Image (cartoon, helix red, strand yellow):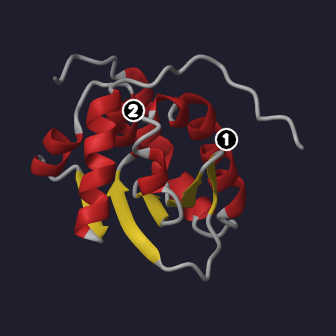
Amino acid sequence: MTTSTPMWPWAALARVAPTLSAVARRLPTQPPSWAAAQFLTQRWWPLVSPEIQPRLCGRRVDVVVTDLGLTLHLRATPGGLVVARQDEPVAVRLHAEARAFVDLMQGRDDPDTLFFEQRLVMEGDTAYALLLKNTLDAIGPVEWRPWRPAARA
């Protein structure tokens, strides 16, 4: 499933990643977790089968973007993704560089390829990780058009 991608953003990111990582590791995790939750709620959650959504709800997933020093704490709810509380146990932790996550979400690579190439590491509840992986496989690419945060209730 791998296709060629322009290298310029990744080369630029590689140059600034050490600086970004040093800064990001010192910042609170809530703002980037909130932004990711908003994006995934609008672009990914509606693509998840209504039969699968309840099975994904209520468990904390940490997404560690290794090259940027970001850790996102997410939990699915019936209405979409939210920031998971720090005191919630982690069901699954995903580790990868930014490019691997983008390649996954844009459909350039699938979770199996990333896993076997050791570009994606999954830790935690194996059954839940497999459910998440199969859900990602079933959905395919996620649309990357500009998005707006959901209106506050």
Q: Is residue 101 above or below residue 115?
A: above
The picture places residue 44, in percent across and down from the top left corner, at 50, 33
The picture places residue 51, in percent across and down from the top left corner, at 41, 41
The secondary structure type at the circle numbered 2 is: helix
The quadrant the C terminus occupies is: top right
Which residue is disc 2 drawn over? 105
Q: Is residue 85 above or below residue 5?
A: below
Q: Nearer the viewer, residue 73 or 70?
A: 73
Q: Nearer the viewer, residue 140 or 71?
A: 140
Q: Residue at x 12, y 46 (%)?
A: 117
Residue lying at the far right in this picture: please name it.
Answer: 153
The quadrant the N terminus occupies is: top left
Q: Is residue 75 left or right of residue 126?
A: right
Q: Nearer the viewer, residue 99 or 15?
A: 99
Which residue is disc 1 drawn over? 38
The picture places residue 67, in percent across and down from the top left corner, at 41, 53
Label 2 – label 1 distance at C-alpha: 15 Å
Residue lying at the far left in this picture: please name it.
Answer: 116
Q: Residue at x 43, y 60 (%)?
A: 64
The secondary structure type at the circle numbered 1 is: helix
Quadrant of the image occupied by residue 15? top left
Question: For mark 2, does the 10 Å Cα neighbourhood hold few (<14), some (14 to 19), or many (20 or more) residues?
Answer: many
Task: Give the mark nearest the N terminus, 2 or 1.
Answer: 1
Q: Nearer the viewer, residue 5 or 146?
A: 146
The picture places residue 91, in percent across and down from the top left corner, at 40, 71
Question: For mark 1, does the 10 Å Cα neighbourhood hold few (<14), some (14 to 19), or many (20 or more) residues?
Answer: many
Q: Residue at x 10, y 49 (%)?
A: 116
> Which amino acid is tagged 1?
Gln
Q: Is residue 92 above or below residue 12?
A: below
Quadrant of the image occupied by residue 39? top right
> Which amino acid is tagged 2?
Met
Q: Residue at x 45, y 58 (%)?
A: 63
